[in-house]
Structure formats: structure tokens, C-alpha cells
Image: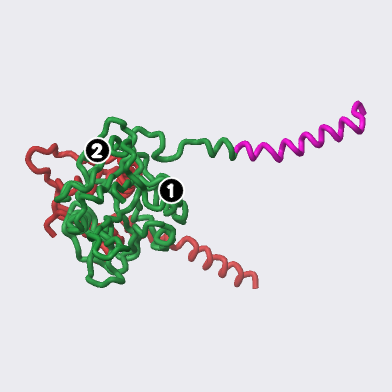
Amino acid sequence: MGMDRRTFLKLGGAIVIGSMITPGTQYLLASQEKKPGEKSKTRWGMVVDLNKCTGCKVCEKVCREENNVPFYGNKRYDAYWIRVANIRQELPGAPERYIPLLCQHCADAPCVHVCVTKASFVRKDGIVLVDEHRCIGCRYCVVACPYRARSIIFRNSNTWTNKELPRMMIGVATKCTFCVHRVDKGVEPACVEKCPHNALTFGNINDPNSKIAKIIAEGKTQVLRPEKLVRPGVFYKGL
Amino acid sequence: MKMKAITAFLVFLVILTLPFLVSAVNGDILSQAPQPKLEKAKAPAGVENKCVEEVPYMRANHMNILKTARVQVVRNGLREKYKKYSLENCFTCHRNRAEFCDKCHSYAGVEPGCFGDRGGCHYANTKK
């Protein structure tokens, strides 16, 4: 025995404490890893100018036509990818105001965190998508979304205006995709292109020279529900 | 008693080797079964008359190719890279869906989920 009791206890203690600390450092390292949409070159985002929005709901109609979003005329089943809400006015006689609500394409999307099948995911360029082949329709994401941006398809749909995209069938969660098929081709989303009042601006937030980054840099934009800390990609001006 | 045991064993052996015996008598049954007859795919003018992969490979693995392309497009956004493996691209030459998809699939008892009559989400841009 070349070790006295004291060194033995010291060594043993060191090993125990070391084995307790090491996994903690692993977590620390993991938390410093790159988060999706944060440091990548492109992060697609949108700025909605509420001063220009008149509540004409052209964006809703255009979105339905572009993405085959079903409309049944029944409030319980209707799916919305973008919906124009009326802001309630406190003062009598105040002008009517409208706010287009769509998926905010959060960097820390709660819908992605809760998804049991990993059907929801954040793409490298910040777009949050649903893999509809993988979705089982459990509706966790619908509950988790702080913006109510997701719709479950409750009925089989015959809406099939755009044959390039699949028709929506029963039992999946769907949401705004920023018209990802158009964005990949380098075209703006349909609602941005067709808005008659130019209230919507689409672009790359991480590129300081883009139009949208300059609007955000002015400092007059806000995000909805900032207390949720989900880092949305949609900004509102004149809220 | 011993005779009985041997007979039972022989009967058991015959039952065990029945599949081999039947095929030894009848020859290869699989090749004798009626195969679905397909008409040859014709590329439209201006397109090379050649499939994206070799024909026997496509016959065995077209579903995996389509699945890979779907995952890469949806998850990673590699739309341009996997365009030639898309369902749309199949239909440029295989114009007749009833001929190229349905005939073999109904023969094998497999329903393609892409554009089946119940729950088909994708549009088959073909004459049916």
C-alpha cells in the first residue's frame, strides 16, 4: 500500500466531483452551438406596415389560391394561413385598424419543440415548415403556437387551384410556408406580390443591404408578443 | 410401433419440403404467372429518351428515389438538385398513369399514396 488514507479520500472525492461536473460542461457547450436561422447567411422575414393595411383581405384570398388552403364556410373547420384581424379600438370614433396575422417563422419555434414526430422543423434559412408526410395530426403544435398560426385540416378538401402544389387532406397541421416553393425560385410570396397597398415587405433579415433589414434598422418595428422570447421573423410597423 | 414412427417422419419430411417439390414439378411458378404488359415510355420531342437511372434499377428502387427526393426537397430545400427525380419529371415521359403506375401497382396489390383515388394529395399530370 503506497497510499495513505488521506490521499485516498482526496482522490476519491476528486473523481466523484469530476464525474458530476463533466456532464454539466457538455450541456454548456451544447447551449453555445449554432441555433437555426441565427448565424446563417439568409433568414427570410417579413415586415408588415399596419399604416398601409386597409383590411381588404386580398392576401387571404391570394394565399388560398396559391397554396390550396381549404375554405368550407364553416368557422370550425376553416384553415387560415394568413388572416386579417380587426384591432379592437378603445376610443369611440377611432379609425378602423387591421392586422394581418400569419406564421411568425420564429427562430425558437415552440411548435418545433413540441412536435413528437419531428415533422415540424426550422429550415436553415429560418422558414418553419411541416413535413406533411410525417405529421400525425396530434395538434400539439396548434396548442403550442402563441400566434395561433396553425390550422388542422379537419375535412378532405377539394380546393385545388394550384396544381403544382399538393392538395390538403384530412389530419395534418398546416401553416404559412412563406410560399417556400416561390422563395426557392427567387420569387416573393404570393401575399407580398399581390398586396394592392404594398403593406408587406419580404426579404433577407441577415443581409444588412436588403430593403427589409433597412426598415428594421430604423427601429420602428415591433414583434408580436415579445415576452414569449421566440424571436419571430415577422415584424410589424405602426403597431 | 417403429414402422409408424418412420412413416410419420416421412410424411413430415414431405410436408416440410412441399414448396421445393412443387417447384421441382412445375418449374418456376413466378415466371409463369401472367405479367402486366406495359407499353414503352416515349420521351416528348426535345427530351432525351433515357430514364434518370438504369431501367432495372428504377424498377426495383423508384420508390426509394422518390422518397429521398421528397425528403431532400422538403427538409433541405434542394429543389433544383432533385428536380430530375421529382414525380413531375417522371410524367414527362411516362405520360399514362394508368399504364405505368396503376397497372403494376394493382397487380402487386400496392397502392401508391401519392395520387390514389382515396386520399391522393398530388396531381398526376397525365391522361388517365
The tag on residue B111 is: none
Q: Residues within 10 Å of mark 1 (few under 14, many from 20)?
A: some
The chain assigned the colour green in the figure is: A
- Up-down relation of residue B57 to residue A191 (above or below): above
In the image, what residue type sits under mark 1?
Answer: Val
Residue lying at 58% horizontally and 37% vertically, measured from the top left: A28
Tags 2 and 1 on a common chain: no
Q: Position of residue B12 (x, y in %)?
A: 53, 66
| Element assignment for label 1 | loop
Look at the image and tell me in which quarter the N terminus of chain A lies.
Answer: top right
> Chain ID for label 1?
A
| Element assignment for label 2 | loop
Q: Residues within 10 Å of mark 2 (few under 14, many from 20)?
A: few
Q: Residue furthest front?
A: A92
Magenta: main secondary structure equals helix
The answer to whether marks 2 and 1 mark residues whose Cβ atoms lie closer than 8 Å is no
Residue lying at 30% horizontally and 56% vertically, measured from the top left: A101
- Up-down relation of residue A177 to residue B82 (above or below): below
Left or right of A198 on screen, residue A119: right
Q: Which residues are magenta?
A: A1-26
* Figure disc tally: 2
The chain assigned the colour red in the figure is: B
Residue B95 in view in this figure = yes
Q: Residue furthest top?
A: A2
The one nearer the camera, A5 or B28, is: A5
The tag on residue B80 is: 2
Q: Position of residue B115 (x, y in %)?
A: 24, 59
Disc 1 marks which residue?
Answer: A230
> Chain ID for label 2?
B
Q: Quadrant of residue B42?
A: top left
